[in-house]
Image (cartoon, rainbow, N blue to C red):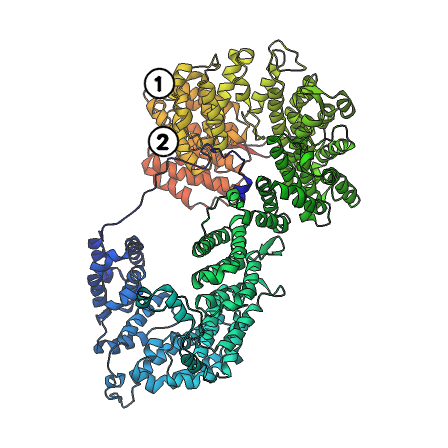
Amino acid sequence: MLEKMALTETDNGSSGGDGGESDIIVKTCVLGGFSESDETRALISSLPEVQGDMVSTESVTQRFLVIMNRYQEQPHLLDPHLDWMFNMILETIRNEKSPPSLVHLSFKFLYIICKVRGYKIFMQLFPHEVADVQPVLDLLSRQDPKDTETWETRYMLLLWLSMTCLIPFDLSRLDGHLESDGGKSREPIMDRILAIAKVIYINVFVFMTRPDVKQKRLGDFLDWSLMTITQTNDQSMTDIMVLDGALQSLVTHKHTDHVEVCAPTVLQCLEKKHLSDSSQAMLRKLGVKLIQRLGLTFLKPRLAAWRYQRGSRSLAANLSMSQTTAVTAAVSPDVETREQEEDYDIPEEVETVIEHLLVGLKDKETIVRWSAAKGIGRVTGRLPKELADEVVGSVLDCFSFQETDNAWHGGCLALAELGRRGLLLPSRLTDVVPLIIKSLTYEEKRGACSVGSNVRDAACYVCWSFARAYEPKELQPFVSQIASALLITAVFDRNVNCRRAASVTLFLLLYKAGFALFFCSVYIASFPEYTKAMIDHLVEMKINHWDGVIRELSTKALHNLTPQAPDYMATTVLPRLLPMAVGMDLLGRHGAILACAEITHALYKLGLQTNKTVVDIISSECVDGLKNIHQMCYCTFLNVVVLSRGFGGELMRPAVCGLIEKLSLSKLPFKNDPVITGWQWLIDDTIKTLHLVSSGAKDGIMTAVVSALSALCEEYYQIQPGQADPQMQGELNISLCYTEGLNSPQMLTRCGSALALGSLPRFVIHSKMKQILEGLQQMCTVSQKEGSFPEARRDAVRAIAQVCVTAGVDTHGSPDSVLCSENVSEVYGTLLDSMNDYTTDSRGDVVVVFMSTLPDLCCSECRVKCMMCCLVQQAAEKIDRYRAHAGNIFLRLLHSTEPAVPHIPHREELLSIFPPETTASLNWNAPSQAFQYITQLLGLTQYQYHTLLGLTVSVGGITESTVHFSSQSLFDHLKGIQHNSVALTQFGDTLLSIFRDNLRNDRVAIPFLKMLNQMLANSCFEIFTTQENHQFCVDLLTLCKEIKKSKDISKLRACISVFCGLIQFQGNVRKKVLSQLLMLLCHSFPVIRKTTASQMYEMVLTYDDVIDPEVLDDAMTILSDTNWFDDIPTVRTHRNQLADLLQVPRPQVIAKVTTEPTEVFL
């Protein structure tokens, strides 16, 4: 909501499809039934045959897993088929002849089904008759608990055993004669099950609830559990598992008389164990859970008669009685019942339980705090009123600023539980509500971030529970406070979950209280009850926030809230902010300066509606305070060099520049005031020292400086509209200052100077345009000796566009004042050259500005052709945003009618390819849409070279979607001209021209080789392969020889693939290709030798006419078995053997005088 308020006056336009592809169709997959039943039956039936064969077993298992996973979201579709699948697998398990590997594989299949359908449903299929108990126990006892490969078997056997434990017979009846045939006594089934539980560390609470087990073994099991808890620690994974199992068994156990007797002993054991100090969150949670269960054991089960009740607990009573009667009866319980409830002693152990639960509220893990909060609610519900009130007071102690955020969060959860259960009486609300309001804005800075979002979210939960628990009359005194706090959280909180929770809670609270509210930023503030609260919250909590984005958005929100309370802003808020703007708190100073600027500008815009100036609205003291902000910052911070550099300078410079911009736009009466000179000095000094700021802050500072300069010039540097003030212009000479900055050795100073020149108004540029354009054009073509400065060249191109648009057009005008016939050629030359500068970020983003306004001036045939071809090239390249920008400009120029652009090559063909509706429908960002149009330009002679040059870096790129769609469209075009030898020859000549022109340009050469490899692999030049020594192949081979001399690994690898693709051509050229590959087998780089051998191996398999079939096996053996990483003399021997098999002359070593020996083909 804060972002919405800050952007109320912003034009929210469409991004033009920058979000990605728009042609993706989302399909849902709703299955109608289990369609793979036959295949599943076959897979299960094949288990006896595939077991033992690792490959077959893995294949069958993976296929079964794929089938089952399809039904993860619709597992009920398996229900009609569970019986036969289960019975088939169980039959294999029960078969005594089944080997252990088959049994484990069968249980694995059972587990896969169980995982999809859910164990609660699936375990009901297990047979649970008396005869099943002994076999399941025997099979489970034979398992190795430490075997990680067969855990599915143990898991399914434990599920089966849990079902057999439900048989309604005393387990001692199943023992029979405990003496075996050998005279040794057998262990009872009851003891065997407990022994397994102790070994595998499982929760056996279901088994322990059996009456016979409870009577005979409960005491021993409790003793074992306590001994286990005492003797283990949480330092090893084994002990952690043992502790987890023992604690879970105690936590989930039902309350019996025996347990009540042992409860003090269990509590004493837990106190000695100090589980709250454990490093394992799960153990701490189980400790808290067990302690609260013990606390409930010490207290009698009852509903507290003193609790606050909203209506009757009986639905029938609520329907039959009026609400008033029900509430009265519930809130005023019978006196006799109350006396009976209070007349019992509370054991001393309860105090220990509550103490542990209060400690759990401050735990560092949420799951522990949540369990402790629930325990507080459950135990308090069984206490007398006085003791329960003491518990509430202890919970309120968590809300101390000496406590951590964990304590605040736990306290909120506990209050929510108490309120939800009616245990927080209305008399306590006066103490609770202020703490909850503080929790709604709780935030603590920790380093570069903050904590507290969970506290604010929990505070919303507390308010929600109050709205549900209390009658409106009980909350009426607090509704205004709570609603204001919730509203502020819903609108301004930086965490989206807190905003959502607050908005839902606020709706419920106001609905219960009889109010109605619609959420819409400024509209909310139009309610008098909330306006000042929202403004005060922004001033007190948000403009000094640690997050800079929040500070900036908050000041913009204050701008939008000003019309709701202009007098309050002018008389209270602004005087309050001015001292903060010159204070010592850096973050508060930054936010206050921005807020002063935004509020002043908002008051100015309000004054326009009533013909008042800002001076008429705010006091003279505030005007002086605004003017002195810059001077106070200058005097205070220059001495400690904060304004010049460092983090303080990165915050204060853009803030003061923002203040300059807004005060200039607000037309404050500072003309000819010395403060103007100070503002100008700050702007100039900021541009000169941009290289001292961090890279993350430079863009924001540069934007603020340029905006401030433009507003300052417009307001204070002209004596009347369009006429510069000679005095100010003479003293400052702005254009000369920034023109000299274009030659600075610092790149960022050049960038700032260029953008400053682009922001100057027309009256400043007048009579100095020639000087400005010459400086900017020189910066666009800076020599390498002075450094590349790509960002400076980018900003210079932008500045040229802005200067030309600002100056305007006059064909017969002066080149020193406007864009005219004398200087337009140089401007266009600079722009078109910049489109080929691939070290910059500016490619064709300003051409449309001139073409749409200067048809008679600049549209010569040669210039238009060059411009359209450059745009086509950019529209075919791999970067989405550049392709989209160039493509959209191309279509705008093509379809421009007022005025129409003349001399566009192939206009009619272009209009048929790009009809008018494509201007709006074609998404250039989506490769699937763009390339199918772009490749059609390959058939147009004037555009073929530039289109193919752009496609080269797309087809040979690394982005999967771009490569896929660009190559698919390119191959579709080539498939259409396969039988047109003239068109294919012309395409081949263009291809060779691109290769020849970019032989030393790695940006194009490497993608070109990758694209060429794809063309050869797809037989795109099949018509050429039928002719021996076709000139296309000869020329291509000659150019690839030059690439072979490179030391670039990626380029050499791409060249090897092209050589292997050229082998499909007939004639002597094939021998020459093989010779080049043989020389690469002895390249100085071992990785190139290995790559060449691998590629040749695939080549020989693909083209069976390359080598005589009789020696094919020998050649492939050499290529595959030779260690190509050996030294070159050893490798050369094997290479020469391969040359003999290929019937190609061996390359000869020629020693050169100045270089190392080189192999050549003689």
Determine whether, in the image, residue 145 is placed left or right of residue 408: left
Residue at image mark 2:
1018
Q: CA distance from mark 1 to mark 2?
A: 17 Å
Label 2, secondary structure: give it.
loop
Question: Mark 2 belongs to which amino acid?
Answer: Asn
Q: Residue at x 48, y 15 (%)?
A: 898
- Give the label on residue 389, or none: none
Residue 440, picture quadrant: bottom right
The numbered mark, 1 or 2, whose residue comes first in the sequence reads 1
Residue 100, picture quadrant: bottom left
Q: Is residue 979 above or below residue 97?
A: above
Inspect this view and state whether residue 561 appears: yes
Residue at image mark 1:
981
Question: Mark 1 belongs to which amino acid?
Answer: Ser
Q: Is residue 1076 above or below residue 91?
A: above
Counting from the top left corner in percent of width and height, residue 344 is at 45, 84
